[in-house]
Image (tube, rainbow, N blue to C red):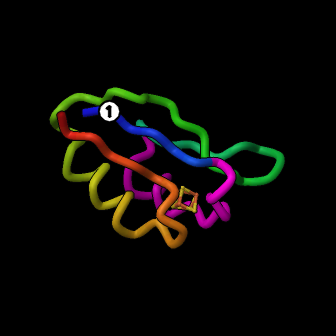
Amino acid sequence: MRITVDQDLCCGAGQCVLIAPDVFDQRDEDGIVELLDPAPGPELKDDVHEAAAVCPTAAITVDDG
Ligand code: SF4
């Protein structure tokens, strides 16, 4: 599983951080998403997919390959 985030799309809503705090964080200065782990283990798959689904700007892309 590989994850990418588009910081230009992110509006800093923070939903992803609430759902998967081991994978996503927010910049202190403006709340824009930061990717902590671009290749998390399978145990985080459900959380990462949920984070991508709830992101209001579709800034998170998940590749399960
Ligand atoms: S849920 Fe989406 S918009 Fe909100 S902080 Fe995460 S990537 Fe950014």
Residue of label 1: 2
Query: Which is more toward the observer, 32 or 3?
Result: 3
Q: Position of residue 2 (x, y in %)?
A: 32, 33
Query: Which is more toward the observer, 10 or 30?
Result: 10
Query: Which is more toward the observer, 16 or 21?
Result: 16
Numbered disc total: 1
**Vertical side of 57 occupied by 26: above or below:** above
Q: Is residue 49 left or right of residue 34?
A: left
Question: Which residue is found at the position 37% from the left and 58% from the top?
Answer: 51
Which secondary structure dominates the residues rendered in magenta?
loop
Tell whether circle 1 marks a residue whose Cβ is less than 8 angstroms from ligand 1.
no
Q: Is residue 33 magenta?
A: no
**Vertical side of 6 occupied by 54: above or below:** below
Q: Is residue 38 left or right of residue 6?
A: left
**Vertical side of 39 occupied by 16: above or below:** below
Q: Is residue 34 left or right of residue 21?
A: right
Q: Position of residue 36 (x, y in %)?
A: 50, 31
Tag 1 secondary structure: strand
Question: Which residue is found at the position 45% from the left and 52% from the top?
Answer: 60
**Figure quarter occupied by ligand 1:** bottom right
Question: Which residue is found at the position 63% from the left and 59% from the top?
Answer: 9
Q: Position of residue 28 (x, y in %)?
A: 76, 44
Say which amino acid is labelled 1: Arg
Few, some or many C-alpha atoms within 10 Å of disc 1 (few <14, some 14-19, many ≥20)?
few
Is the C terminus in the top left, top right, bottom left or bottom right quadrant? top left
The boundaries of the magenta stretch are 7-21
Question: Which residue is found at the position 29% from the left and 61% from the top?
Answer: 50
Q: Position of residue 34 (x, y in %)?
A: 60, 39
Is the N terminus in the top left, top right, bottom left or bottom right quadrant? top left
Q: Is residue 18 magenta?
A: yes
**Vertical side of 49 occupied by 3: above or below:** above
